[in-house]
Amino acid sequence: MAVTETKVTETFVNGQKDLFVRQDVPLEVRRKNVLDSWVRIKNSHSIPKSEIVLTEERIERAFDQYEHGLSHGEPARKAAFLIQSRSSLEFPYGDITGFLPALSTEKYGINPEVRHKIFFGLPPFEVTQYLKKDNSGDEKIIGSIISVPLSIDDMRNVQRCEVSQMKKMRAVVGYTQPLIVDAVRFAKEKLGVDSFGLGETMASMTAYGRIVEAEVPDSMVGTGHAGTTYLINSTITSAAEQGGIDLGKVLVGIIGCGSIGSAVSLNLDPRVNQIMLSDIDKVRAENLKNEITSKRPEVEVVIAESNEELAQKSRLIVGAGSNLTPILTRRDIVPGTIIVDDSQPPRH
């Protein structure tokens, strides 16, 4: 059975001809567009042959697996964790070239727009697998990491015609939801997955997975926030120790009071007794303040008037926002400040 492609709501497609990810384009056209862009690169003499071969194999596999599923004899995956690229045209991360090494702008001068047309022109694909050793010591595939073609640049583009912050967020949600649902449907129908974790901002964009469960029946969806919270708080403790910071004597700033910011704030190292919160939604920040103080009455919690105020007063800052414009700039930050950034996309 072919995967049913989810269409992006016309509201978010009309007039947006510069989007890298266009779910209203048939799969065969997307494949042709990607391969047409790839052909300009594959004949380059400056890129090692091994990287050309690996990149082409992975491009072909992405389309083949999306259309036909697992190869004969491949075991079904039990679980999948969904991720997205953090790369933008302006700031290329290593996640694209980690999977498609021949697309490196830094090493081979690949045009960023061509790089994006290829990577974000791919359908959802399996980046790698989770392996587990059985009793005999053999490794077996039990799960997958799935890349969802969500482009930071496209998220910015769909906001261009909107004025209010609320309408901008609705535009982003309208753009991202069908792509996330399509990735889950692919993993379920083609890879045999029935349990999903949503990484990055995907939980927030789908009402914490409820939209996905409604669109793809018999799917168990988790947010992945528990693991993220643990890692952030572990990093805070470790960074403070390495930086010689006494957590009992510094103000810890939390930018973003959503799901991650809230969980981090409520589970900070017990030595922390001063917290400053900042969020565009002041009611949400006030609610989190009340929740923290009810759980830990000894902690002083204040709400910043702005991110800039928080940056000036805090010596350890946690970024947990989902803004598509910069949260802080270099000039806002006091030298020596430690920043633990889980912003999606990174915004410091």
Image: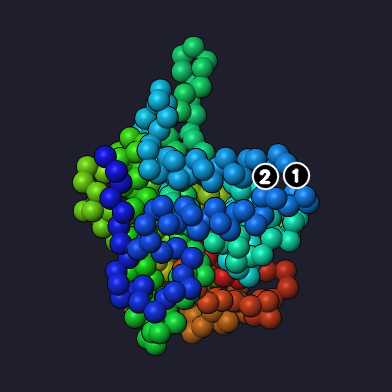
Q: Residue at x 40, y 44 (%)?
A: 66
- Secondary structure at badge 2 equals helix
Q: Is residue 223 left or right of residue 94?
A: left
Residue that numbered label 2 is attached to:
52
Which is more toward the observer, 263 or 163?
163
Mark 1 nearby-residue class (10 Å; few <14, some 14–19, many ≥20): few
Which is more toward the observer, 338 or 99?
99
Q: Is residue 199 left or right of residue 218?
A: right
**Residue 136 on image: x %, y %:** 49, 12
Outermost residue toward the top? Answer: 136
* Callout 2 touching callout 1 (CB < 8 Å): yes
Q: Name the image quarter holding residue 56.
A: top right
**Vertical arrangement, residue 45 with respect to residue 266, above or below:** above
Mark 2 nearby-residue class (10 Å; few <14, some 14–19, many ≥20): some
Inter-mark Cα distance, 2 to 1: 7 Å
**Residue 302 on image: x %, y %:** 47, 76
Which is more toward the observer, 297 or 69?
69
Name the quarter where the C terminus is drawn: bottom right
**Residue 267 on image: x %, y %:** 45, 55
Q: Residue at x 63, y 78 (%)?
A: 329
The type of residue carrying mark 1 is: Pro
Residue that numbered label 1 is attached to:
48
- Secondary structure at badge 1 equals loop
Q: Residue at x 49, y 35 (%)?
A: 129
Viewer can see residue 277: no
**Vertical arrangement, residue 115 with respect to residue 19, above or below:** above
Outermost residue toward the bottom? Answer: 163
Q: Residue at x 38, y 61 (%)?
A: 25
The type of residue carrying mark 2 is: Ile
Q: Tell me, for residue 325, which label it has, or none.
A: none
